[in-house]
Amino acid sequence: MELVLFLIFGFLALVGSLGVILSRNVVHSALFLLLNFLMLGLLYLVLGAQFLAVSQFIVYAGAIVVLFLFVIMLIGSESVGDFVSKGRRVAAYLGMFLALFFFAGLAYAVGVRVFLPPQGAPGFGAIESVGKLLFTEFLVPFELVSILLLVAMVGAIALAHQVWPAPSREPKE
């Protein structure tokens, strides 16, 4: 059953990635990207990595695709289409080559999985094992990354205030 689900989700991820490349409408490309991200999350579930699947759904399928759609709607899909259409032929051929490469890798991975079942650690990719590793062995790097992200957020806010100063509250005469 796992193999059948893996093949179905892998094929749909491949369809989504081809749709991103070959779609002429930018909004449709973003929706195909959403399909691709969702199928990758489902592949993580089939492989037993629940934490990675939930992270894929929340971060990529949720936040990143919404951000892409927001930017597309903000700048207008007509201007994006004009910019993208210049290199469309080269990108299409490159995309087809990469899709064939991905399909060959997928076929190899399925073949290896059928003939050599994985011997991973028990609980690999589960939330409990990720949490234990994150707060024991990788505690210092985790805290350093959180400080780095906090500094980046404060820096972005400071730069935004320099670029767009707040309007003065003094009454105009």
Image (cartoon, rainbow, N blue to C red):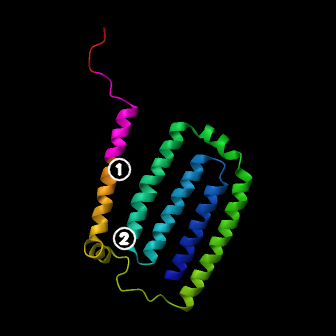
| Residue at 39% over, 64% down | 55
Viewed as shown, does residue 95 lie left or right of 64?
A: right
| Residue at 56% over, 72% down | 10
Residue 89 painted magenta: no
Whole-percent x, y for residue 168 in the image: 30, 22
Whole-percent x, y for residue 40 in the image: 50, 67
Q: Nearer the viewer, residue 23 or 83?
A: 83
Viewed as shown, does residue 48 lie left or right of 137?
A: right
Q: Of the residues shown, which amino acid type is indicated by label 1?
A: Ala
Main SS class of the magenta portion in the image: helix
Position above or below: 1 against 22: below
Return the mark for residue 55.
none
Position above or below: 168 against 119: above
Q: Of the residues shown, which amino acid type is indicated by label 2?
A: Phe
Classify mark 1: residues with Cα within 10 Å, few (<14), some (14-19) or many (20+): few
Hey, which quadrant is residue 58 in on the image? bottom left
Viewed as shown, does residue 29 lie left or right of 138?
A: right
Classify mark 2: residues with Cα within 10 Å, few (<14), some (14-19) or many (20+): many
- Which tag, 1 or 2, sits closer to the chain's start? 2
Viewed as shown, does residue 7 lie left or right of 64?
A: right
Q: Which residue has dot 2 on it?
A: 51
Position above or below: 45 against 95: below
| Residue at 38% over, 86% down | 121
**Is label 1 or label 2 in front?**
1
Q: Which residue has dot 1 on it?
A: 152
- Helix, strand or loop status at disc 1: helix
Residue stretch rendered in magenta on the structure: 154-168
Whole-percent x, y for residue 92 in the image: 70, 57
